[in-house]
Image (cartoon, rainbow, N blue to C red):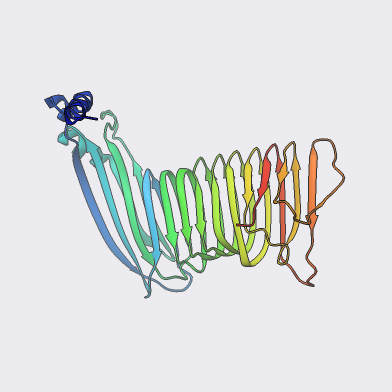
Amino acid sequence: MSFLHHLVQCVGLLAFLGLTTPLGAQEMIQVASKRIDKTFGFNDGYELNIEGERAEVYIEAAEGNEIKVQLELTARHPDQTIARRDLGYVQYLVRRVKNKIYLRNYLKVPENAPDAESQIKAIYRIQVPPNCPVYTKNNYGLIEASRLTNSIRVNSNFSQIGLREVGGMIDVQSRFGDIMGQSLNGNVSINATRSDITLKDMRGSYDINAHYGVVNLFPVEGLLDLRLIANKSEVYLHNVDLETFSYELSAKNGDIRYPENETFVLEEPEVGLQKVQFKPSSEYYPNISVKITFGNLNLSKN
């Protein structure tokens, strides 16, 4: 391609993007913001309770006996006056009541006032002692937590969830929000609808119900047991190890696909139902149970 031809293409692309005219910079987005910082002392028996709306929630364990909260509220709009007005509609709560630390944000438009027009967001950056129990509820945002050791409960809609190096009691309820877990080790319960699930380095015990999603599971040594019930989902079970785990697998109105030369025992097929079982020769072994309806189960060694 000649230099001239290349130049003509670039000019055409710029024109298409509107960058050669003032139209490309029609409106500058104005941002109105407010930041709240607060620190609470932590004692055994305290719990952190978060209720977010269009919020990004980041929770990280840190040494010490304090809960540190940074809350940033923003409203974005081309008109600075409207951005500031809408920021004033955002209500928040950062308070301790007895043994609970409450964090909350929500939108409240005064009577007879114009509706909010801005893009509104809340960002929580929180540090807690590792043994602090956490409950968080969020709609239309994301939740990320790392290195907690006691318990975490998550209830979310349209929110991405990321958990890393979390132990203890883990309870996740999700609708329309993907779940990513890395190095979880505890008693894990997940109930997900229209959410993709990826769990890597799985240790501990798992009870998972998945509906309408793609599920990727990576068990490793240290898994105690795994129970998955999936409906209208595509499931990928990785790290298949016939010397370590026992398998009880079934797919109704779907297929079980496993690597060649594996010694799985395929039971006598029933109409619309496939079953596979395998037990290692060792006396004690973790059990992996997967039941799928209207979906496929794909097994792999990695």
Picture layout, residue 43 above or below residue 215: below
Q: Residue furthest right?
A: 268
Residue 234, picture quadrant: top right
Quarter of the image holding residue 278?
bottom right
In the image, is 241 to the left or to the right of 192? right
Task: Provide residue 176's location: percent of width, then percent of height.
Answer: 51, 40
Residue 101 seen in the figure: yes
Residue lying at the far front of the rendered structure = 2
Q: Is residue 221 left or right of residue 75?
A: right
From the viewer's perspective, is residue 38 above or below residue 22?
Answer: below
Does the rendering let one see residue 49?
A: no
Quick one: which residue is furthest to the left in this view?
A: 22
In percent of width and height, residue 203 lies at 60, 65
Residue sitting at 87 percent across and 45 percent down? 268
143 horizontally vs 88: left or right: right
Q: Residue at x 39, y 71 (%)?
A: 42
